[in-house]
Image (cartoon, helix red, strand yellow):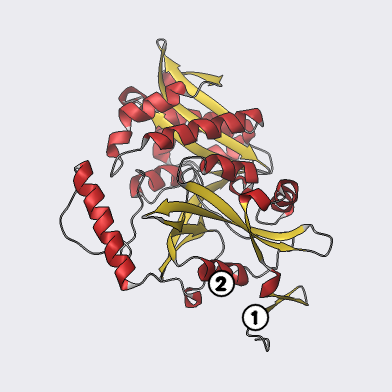
Amino acid sequence: MEPDGTSTFDIQHSVFNIKDLFFFPRSRIDTLAWDACVMASAQRLIYGYSWYLDAVTSARGWKWVGLVLPDEQGNYRAVMPVPLRRRWGKWVVYQPLFCQMLTVFSRDATLDPTPFFDVMLRRFRYGAKINLRQYPAPDLGFQVVRQHATHVLNLSATYETIYKRYSRDRRTNLRRGIAANWRLTDSVDAGPLLRLFRENHADTIPGGVGEWAYTTLQNLISELESRNLGRLRYAERNGQIEAGALFVQEGNRIIYLFNAASEAGRRGNARTVLLDEMIREKASGPVLFDFESPDKSSVVAFYQSFGAAEEPFWTARWSRLTWLERGLVWLLKNTAAAVSGHYSGAGPSPLNQPRDQLQP
């Protein structure tokens, strides 16, 4: 601790003061310097690029700010995006859709992310949810830290080797899917994918899916296509599209970002065929295939059946709101729920038990 009360942190045998970290609004971020830092970082993920963050926070009531550690030349040594959502009249930290995890992106692989997390906690009194690739120590002030996992498949081996690691059931279902004579086609039209999701999956999402979420996804797909980073692929039979998948590749990572299927597509193992075809195409390369796993045991088992292994990340939450603020938020939330027809009666404050919602 310095005499002025600030903290110092050792990075590559040099010392930087926590005062060297700057919060910038989006308008003040040097886009080129930010994206160059993300690309050069050991933690490189497509979710961290400025244009990707712009796309997933494009809906009303969303934005992101950046925490930046600059060097002497004005370049960015390390950056951390902080996504925000306006809730109950306040800007709170909130993980956006289609962005599984964030992190501190640093040109120095040994950089300690702790000061970045510390500054974020000091700046924002409420964090509904943020997913972090690096472990956030609970003693920093996070009230809840939970470990989750995505599942990744290393595609450096030959396809034949990878296929042998499929489970017996997956190989059986793949043979059935191939026998179903699916016709796979690439497209730039996201309409069928969104239609499949609306008709077959949206009703299973607790609270429903706001229209803004579809618009956000459409904007993101357009941005990915303009940068030649996304591949939208459909499974069609008898002239009818029954399943679709959005694959995203940036650097050495392919992400299975979004998918949907009709009942016919599910029964016909169309998504197994879509996944296997992408794995076949990318095998024997220095690439990781990220299934972007949710916390649902049946889906996790499906991805593991391809031979995928766990890769951890952590969800952090916190609240330093006063009891008066907590009570006001509880009242506003339950009033809104009553108006929308989802009122569930008196219950604990949502700030004590944060929940993920897709509706604004």
Name the secondary structure under disc 2.
helix
Relative vertical location of residue 332 with respect to residue 262 in this rendering, above or below: below
Q: Position of residue 302 (x, y in %)?
A: 40, 42
Left/right placement of residue 287 relative to residue 167 reads right
For this rendering, which residue is in front, 17 or 271?
17
Count neighbours of disc 1 (C-alpha within 10 A) and say few if under 14, some if 14 to 19, many if 20 or more: few
Farthest residue, direction top: 239
Disc 2/disc 1 C-alpha distance (Å): 10 Å
Relative vertical location of residue 209 with respect to residue 239 in this rendering, above or below: below
* Residue contact at pointers 2 and 1, CB within 8 angstroms: yes
Tell me the amino acid under the disc marked 1. Answer: Ser
Name the secondary structure under disc 1.
loop
Mark on residue 118?
A: 2
For this rendering, which residue is in front, 262 or 333?
333
Farthest residue, direction right: 73
Mark on residue 7?
A: 1
Q: Position of residue 352 (x, y in %)?
A: 31, 66
Q: Is residue 145 visible?
A: no
Q: Write the residue at 42% across / 25% down.
A: 243
